[in-house]
Image (tube, rainbow, N blue to C red):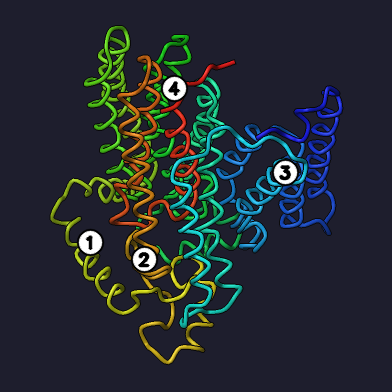
Amino acid sequence: MQSVWESSENHSKRYITIAGFGLLGLLSFFAGFYQDAITTRLILMLLLACLASLFVMIPDRWALRLMFLYLSFEGMAKLLTGYNPVIHVGMDLLMLVLTAKCFILLVVRKRNFPQHYPPLVGLFILHFIWFFIQFANPNTLGIVPSLAAAKIYITMNLLFAYGFYLANDPKELEIFFYPWIIGAVVNIALGLYQAHIGPLSVLGLSPSYAWVLQKYEGYAFRPFGTSSQPGGAGMFVQLSFMFVLYFVLSKGPAIKRLLLAAIIPLGIMLLLFCQVRVLLFKIIIGTSIFVFLNVFYLQGRARRRLLIGIPTIAGLMLVSMPFLTQFWLTARDENVLAMERTLSVFDVQRIRESRSGTLDRIITFAKMVPFGAGLSRTGSAGEVFAKKTTEKESDPFLRGVLFTDNFLASTIADIGIPGSFILTLIVLIILLRAFRGIRECADSQTRLLQITLFSSLVMLMFGAWGSEAILYNPDAAFFWFFGGAAQRIRIWPFEKFE
């Protein structure tokens, strides 16, 4: 997947173009402070247009890294613009721009097709065909709502191919970790600030924050970070957690490893205030898998680094957490309630009761709508089109938003049992192939890399019982891209890195 500019010898043209778009973006940003006519919404839309144009100019690998950085701030942009529809699908628009560029290069300009094709191509094609068959579902809400569901079932799935093709070697793949770590650091800093100040830290930014917080009335305040949901700051901590462990336990400068290790207690501190219990649960599961597989598979110096690194991180946690806890708990009494709710994840009976109706919900959807209730009836799309369902449906079951809060329930409601089966099969095969790839790695460092990806992917799916898991960003972009990268690592022994 070459960029438009990679075949040109005139590199200065590329850098001038990049600088021009960067300057245009900065000018549009600062103009908002001096011109009343230029609103925040217009500024963000202009920046999004600049970013999309930039994607055409730069190599695909850097376009995707910028896209992942954008994803870290997309939630906040939605709230600042009052859920502007263009910003709401910004990630999907960027993905389509990048895919259109690759299509033009490969088909129109006759670039050579890649030598290796991603695995599971047949299943992905079957999944896409079944998705479009849903447009003819008797329960469909129409073309526009059905197209809106592509945000969940099409655009992010394409990242699987990008992950496979762009994970050319260990160094290239490691660079893809940094946008997620940067996003986590920003959310930790902003999230802890919001936890220290309380609701006043966000209410002055946009009326949308007050509207969202109404849904959580009666609960302790949850830090937004740069996300669009209370407690969403913790998502980026969860996604980057294994990457931080990877760098801490890999070869590299001691100061870099120490600074990255410092992220861990601060990230855990943020999770305690986010009150999204499944995030803490997934990190515990993912870390346990990561440590176990490394102890089992690694040998020599790699294992010694693990045996030294894990106790060091544990010691850092024991030393720092009392001070961090004391500082934030004394700042606001409500933080005590937030921490207590998060730690209830260890109360098995309480968690079991809160998820007691999940299996019944799955069975109900399977019986009532075995071939799907029509696209865009669940999640955020369901909220957008709720009025249309209320006006149209005579069946009370299909009125309003279908509450799912589970991966299987959501996919059955959207695309029926056949579609849910196909998508679940794809996910399971990705995980199985990633696990098998651990044994096929040629050296300890590559094996550590594969274990990191496998642990991260499994960690995401452990939350599928109490959430929609990989159907929504940022989890969706993360899973499909690094799921594809995990498949590429398996053929590294047969490739020669340049």
- Across and down, in percent, residue 452 comes to 37, 29
In space, the residues marked 1 and 4 are separated at their CA atoms by 35 Å
- Across and down, in percent, residue 315 comes to 27, 19
Question: Which residue is denoted by mark 1 in the rendering?
Answer: 355
Q: Are marks 2 and 3 in contact (CB under 8 Å)?
A: no
Q: Are marks 1 and 3 in contact (CB under 8 Å)?
A: no
| Circle 3 Cα neighbour tier, 10 Å, few/some/many (<14 / 14–19 / ≥20) | many
Q: Which mark is residue 279?
A: none
Q: Are marks 2 and 1 in contact (CB under 8 Å)?
A: no
| Circle 2 Cα neighbour tier, 10 Å, few/some/many (<14 / 14–19 / ≥20) | some
Q: Amino acid at mark 3?
A: Leu
Pick whichever of labels 2 and 3 is earlier in the sequence: 3
The answer to whether 436 appears left or right of 212 in the picture is: left
Instruction: Identify the element where label 3 is drawn.
Output: helix
Instruction: Identify the element where label 1 is drawn.
Output: loop
Q: Residue at x 69, y 46 (%)?
A: 103
Pick whichever of labels 2 and 1 is earlier in the sequence: 1
The answer to whether 372 appears left or right of 306 in the picture is: right
Viewport quadrant of the C terminus: top right
- Across and down, in percent, residue 240 comes to 43, 34
Question: Which residue is denoted by mark 4 in the rendering?
Answer: 260
Residue 222 versus residue 67: which sits nearer the camera?
67
Question: Which residue is denoted by mark 3 in the rendering?
Answer: 51
Q: Amino acid at mark 1?
A: Arg
**Which mark is nearer the camera, 2 or 3?**
2
In space, the residues marked 2 and 1 are separated at their CA atoms by 25 Å
Instruction: Identify the element where label 4 is drawn.
Output: helix
Q: Are marks 3 and 4 in contact (CB under 8 Å)?
A: no
The answer to whether 288 appears left or right of 182 in the picture is: left
Instruction: Identify the element where label 2 is drawn.
Output: helix
